[in-house]
């Protein structure tokens, strides 16, 4: 009996694998690229003091934005907190700030660059802080989809509506084709407007927000919605299906909110009698249908602020926020738990940690501009057009 000897294999990672590993560059990818510079050690006990001193040295020249899903260690240095669009608008309202340090993900920093002046510089502490949902719709794929709609003879009837959680390229496509952007809190208003402009909507890139808004908030049926898969010929749909549909949903989803299931809802109701289930509209349709309350991140926060003492809540959204809210409202005797038993952070959002923030702030304090996010002028113009249509919604 002989034993096979191990052989050395010359295996070369694919470009996609290299992107996922953060070792290659694709400026259009939400996954980001390698981050230059020497980061301080995460075990450095002086990180908090270093961040404080660098921010103090920069003074009014820097404005730090912190998304709700950020770690507490980062949020403590934010001048304002909020969801992606609120933060982008807050940045635009501070023209005296030379540097906008966006503690969020890539598409959020792009939106801030679009809405701020040319003199302001938007910085993302870690370029690899991307968004898996935004990655699910590329400019090439969406252009191909539009060709499919054109061949089906319906493109002139279709109005694109893109979720804020999309790349600048997708926002620009939306603006160029007469569409608008939406957030999770104004999706119904955006769709109402879109159906006044045309007979059908192409909703990008989150299928769940599109489906939930159409069915739950607008009274459409599930049969009115079809799912366009960019990885299949013709989107995996027949011409007849496309012509019959009112909502053409892109096959994209949030990796965090997509984890919640109907079993999660049933389980928490068994474990905590009388619990209120409150979920984000990026969750699956069956989860939203089984929940007691559904709303955006800001809605979730306000609902818990208004909740009576002694009430119990299971929240279906990112864990950093749920844990922060649980700690905040514990003194008011409000029991707040994560909807699922499985812990689930937004992995890319969590790439913005204290070492990256310290490195970015100290670099700026020394006069070195790092990790600037800059959208090209043509893309910016059309993306801003789509954003302005949203701002003009009644």
Image (cartoon, grey):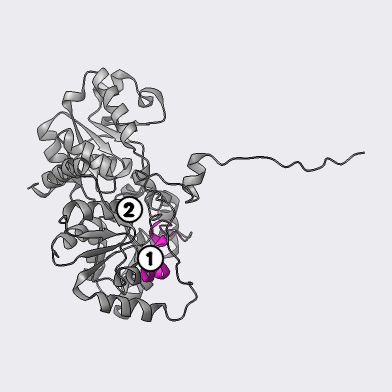
- Exactly how many numbered labels are in the figure? 2
Residue situated in front as seen by the camera: 367 or 99:
367
* Image coordinates for residue 343, horizontal then vertical, percent: 47, 61
Residue situated in front as seen by the camera: 358 or 118:
118
Q: Residues within 10 Å of mark 1 (few under 14, many from 20)?
A: some
Which element is circle 2 on?
Answer: helix
Residue where numbered disc 1 is placed: 320
In the rendered image, is residue 20 in sight?
A: yes
| Residue 344 occupies quadrant | bottom left
Q: Which residues are magenta?
A: 344-359
Q: Which mark lies nearer to you, 1 or 2?
A: 2
Q: Please say if 43 is above or below 303.
A: below
Residues under labels 1 and 2: Cα distance?
19 Å
Which residue: 26% across, 18% down? 151
Residue where numbered disc 2 is placed: 106
Q: Is residue 336 magenta?
A: no
| Residue 304 occupies quadrant | bottom left
Q: Is residue 358 magenta?
A: yes
In the rendered image, is residue 303 in sight?
A: no
């Amino acid at each position: 009996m002989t034993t096979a000897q191990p052989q050395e294999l010359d295996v070369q990672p694919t470009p996609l694998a290299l992107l996922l590993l953060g070792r290659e560059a694709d400026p259009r990818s939400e996954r980001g690229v390698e981050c230059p510079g020497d980061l301080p050690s995460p075990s450095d006990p002086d990180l908090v003091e270093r961040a404080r001193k660098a921010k103090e040295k920069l003074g009014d020249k820097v404005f730090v934005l912190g998304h709700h899903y950020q770690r507490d260690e980062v949020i403590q240095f934010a001048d304002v907190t909020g969801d992606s669009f609120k933060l982008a608008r807050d940045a635009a309202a501070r023209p005296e700030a030379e540097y906008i340090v966006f503690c969020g993900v890539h598409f959020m920093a792009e939106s801030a660059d679009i809405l701020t002046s040319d003199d302001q510089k938007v910085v993302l502490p870690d370029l690899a802080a991307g968004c898996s949902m935004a990655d699910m719709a590329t400019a090439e794929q969406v252009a191909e989809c539009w060709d499919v709609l054109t061949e089906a003879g319906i493109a002139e009837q279709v109005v694109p509506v893109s979720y804020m959680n999309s790349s600048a390229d997708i926002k620009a496509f939306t603006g160029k084709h007469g569409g608008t952007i939406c957030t999770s809190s104004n999706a119904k208003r955006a769709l109402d407007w879109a159906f006044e402009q045309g007979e059908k909507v192409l909703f990008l890139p989150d299928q769940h927000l599109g489906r939930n808004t159409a069915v739950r908030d607008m009274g459409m049926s599930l049969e009115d919605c079809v799912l366009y898969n960019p990885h299949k010929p013709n989107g995996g749909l027949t011409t007849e299906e496309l012509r019959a549909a009112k909502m053409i949903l892109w096959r994209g989803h949030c990796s965090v909110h997509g984890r919640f299931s109907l079993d999660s809802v049933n389980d928490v109701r068994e474990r905590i009698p009388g619990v209120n289930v409150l979920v984000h509209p990026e969750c699956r349709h069956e989860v939203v249908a089984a929940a007691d309350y559904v709303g955006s991140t800001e809605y979730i926060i306000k609902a818990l602020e208004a909740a009576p003492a002694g009430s119990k809540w299971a929240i279906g959204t990112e864990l950093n926020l749920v844990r922060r809210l649980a700690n905040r409202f514990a003194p008011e005797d409000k029991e707040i738990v994560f909807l699922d038993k499985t812990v689930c952070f937004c992995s890319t959002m969590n790439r913005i940690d204290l070492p990256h923030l310290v490195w970015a702030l100290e670099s700026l304090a020394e006069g070195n501009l790092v990790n600037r996010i800059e959208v090209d002028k043509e893309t910016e113009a059309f993306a801003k057009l789509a954003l302005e249509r949203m701002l003009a919604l009644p």
